[in-house]
Image (spheres, helix red, strand yellow):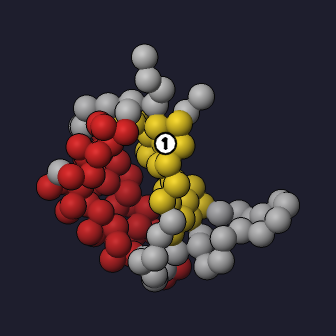
Amino acid sequence: MSRPIQLHADLSIDPAREAETIDYFETVYRPTASRFEGYIDLRLLKLQGALAGAAPAGINYRFSITFASETLRQRWVASAPHQEVWGKLETFVTKREYDFLLFEVI
């Protein structure tokens, strides 16, 4: 049996659009993702500070999505609903250079 996977992406959300971003994430993005096979969890984490070392430059949020497998996550990514909701989410960011980190959940 395979383990779930979790994808992390650091985001630079426009501070002037923070409330709008959070509302969109909670009322549109998460509900859309949750309808897909294999979906487990989706979080938007607001950076509060670096307790040791340094936070990635210029980011203020981390996006974290968990699926039962990478295959099922890829189906979500390839879907028209994902293209629509990710495209809208990108309107809230100040830069579109992302580091996508994929983890196996142990």
Residue placed at 26% from the left, 60% from the top? Answer: 85
Q: Is residue 100 visible?
A: yes
Residue 43 at what x, y percent from top left?
49, 48
| Residue farthest toward the right in the current orientation of the protein | 52
| Residue farthest toward the top in the current orientation of the protein | 1
Closer-to-camera residue (20/102): 102
Left or right of residue 89, residue 98 in this image: right
Quarter of the figure with the C terminus = top right
Decide: is 100 above or below 64.
below
Residue 51 at what x, y percent from top left?
83, 60
Residue 28 at what x, y percent from top left?
28, 54
Residue placed at 75% from the left, 65% from the top? Answer: 49
Residue placed at 30% from the left, 37% from the top? Answer: 71
Look at label 1 and name its amino acid.
Answer: Gln
Left or right of residue 20, residue 57 in this image: right
Residue placed at 46% from the left, 82% from the top? Answer: 94
Element under disc 1: strand
Residue 100 at what x, y percent from top left?
48, 59
Q: Please tell me how crowded label 1 is: few (under 14), some (14-19), or many (20+) other residues with Cα within 10 Å.
A: many
Closer-to-camera residue (78/40): 78
| Residue farthest toward the left in the current orientation of the protein | 80
Decide: is 25 above or below 11.
above
Closer-to-camera residue (2/62): 2
Q: Is residue 18 visible?
A: no
Q: How many marks?
A: 1
Q: Which residue is mark 1?
A: 6
Decide: is 5 above or below 89.
above
Left or right of residue 36, residue 98 in this image: right
Quarter of the figure with the N terminus = top left
